[in-house]
Amino acid sequence: MPDQPQQTVIVWLDPSQLPFVQAVAARARIRIVAAGSPARARSQELAEALAATCVDDLRNTLISLSPAGGAGGPGAPPKDMPQSSADQCDLIWLASVERSTALEPAILDAVRACQDRGITIVTSEPIPAAVLELGSSDDQSGVLGPMTDSSTADELDSAGPSSTWPALIPRFRAGKTMPDLTDSLEEFGSPRTIHFECFGLAVECSLGARLMDAMDTIRSLVGEPEEMFALHVPTLGLARAAPSKSALDSLRDLGGTMSAIMRFSDGRSASVLVSDAGGEWRRSLTLLGDPNHPKGGRLRITDVSMEWIGSDGAVLERTRKRRSIGPISAPPLFTPASTLPTSSAIDVFAEALSQNGRRRAKSLPPMNHVGVLAMTGAILLSARTGQAESPITIRRMVGAG
């Protein structure tokens, strides 16, 4: 059986991510046809290292793109226009974004228009990174509509255009072990306590991306909490971060370690510990069930395994997934330790970028950005105020119009 053709990818990366991106591309068997960087002066150097065409303007690149092997939709370049390797691709991977660039409404609109033309964009950084970014350049205020005390989370969530935003990778819910968890939950029963962890290096993805992934996972299992209390330890030093002028901080440019605990209206709880200064990649979800349930106990799932221990201590199920992608390539010599890609992280990102990983991600509902960003907003607010905060507070702050 012939091999599937290589996916062609345009990547936007920080210079420090070069060894990581090279290793992921080799493992996922993707071909990088163009590359650029928020550090524009380094774009040519990075493109040459990746044997790719240089693109140094993200917005113009998004506007000019058309799907590989097919005509574009509205806004795509004319069919008779000469096409270069940077004008067509199967996928755009935003491994990094610049804070000022990504916050421009014109960039956000170009991202959404590109997806509307059938070009898949995936991002390793939060886009959007705050509830206020959910509006287009023509509708930046009041993106959630009128807010009342009787408004439900579901009613407010319907305002979020989630399907037009880039998919976050690697999304834990799109991992290859999640179907095992879904199957087991029917017998396990409703989880009473949840704990999510994700550790790794900043060259893989930021603290903000890990926090967004954590909230997406927890929200999908137990809904939205009533209260959230969080603590943030910056990467450099232990001094508390200065208060922001805005009541709504962004996930972008967030680094260090974040811990949070959550209380739900029905008595359930959840906790999170995420860090982009935690060494080798580790990501896991632990569920504790009802002790009175005959098959409750503890479920623990990672990117590659699942373990179910019954309430009596017996092992009910253990599974481990095999690698479904290519071999790792050695990192360049003299790579700084802080940017040295770890095998586990390369595996996870390569799986997410592979055709199997993308098919799995497309089978899921898109991330509910309104709900997820309301939760991350409450965490950021709590970390700044030192008080418990609620996602509904974030909804009210941006829903006044």
Image (spheres, helix red, strand yellow):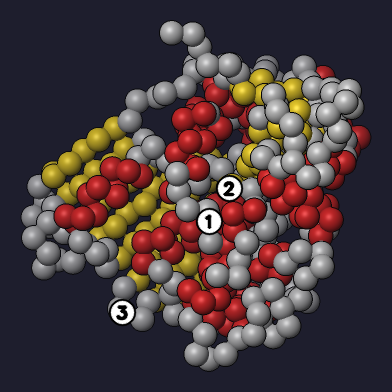
Task: Select label 1 or label 3 by which is in front.
Answer: 1
Viewer-closest of 216 and 77: 77
Return the x and y of residue 47 as percentages of the image width and height.
Answer: 81, 24
What amino acid type is highlighted by mark number 3?
Asp
Helix, strand or loop status at disc 3:
loop
| Tag 1 and tag 3, C-beta contact below 8 Å | no
| Residue at x 54% of width, y 21% of height | 27
Return the x and y of residue 106 as percentages of the image width and height.
Answer: 84, 56
Residue 266 marker: 3
- Image check: 115 left or right of 289? right
Residue 367 marker: 1
Return the x and y of residue 153 as percentages of the image width and height.
Answer: 49, 76
| Residue at x 49% of width, y 61% of height | 215
Viewer-closest of 316 and 353: 353
- Image check: 280 left or right of 377? left
Report the Cα–Cα distance between label 2 and label 1. 8 Å
Quarter occupied by residue 398: bottom right
Other-residue count near label 2 (Cα within 10 Å), few / some / many at <14 / 14–19 / ≥20: many
State whether residue 9 appears in this view.
no
Quadrant in which the C terminus appears: bottom right
Report the Cα–Cα distance between label 1 and label 3. 24 Å
- Image check: 329 left or right of 185? right
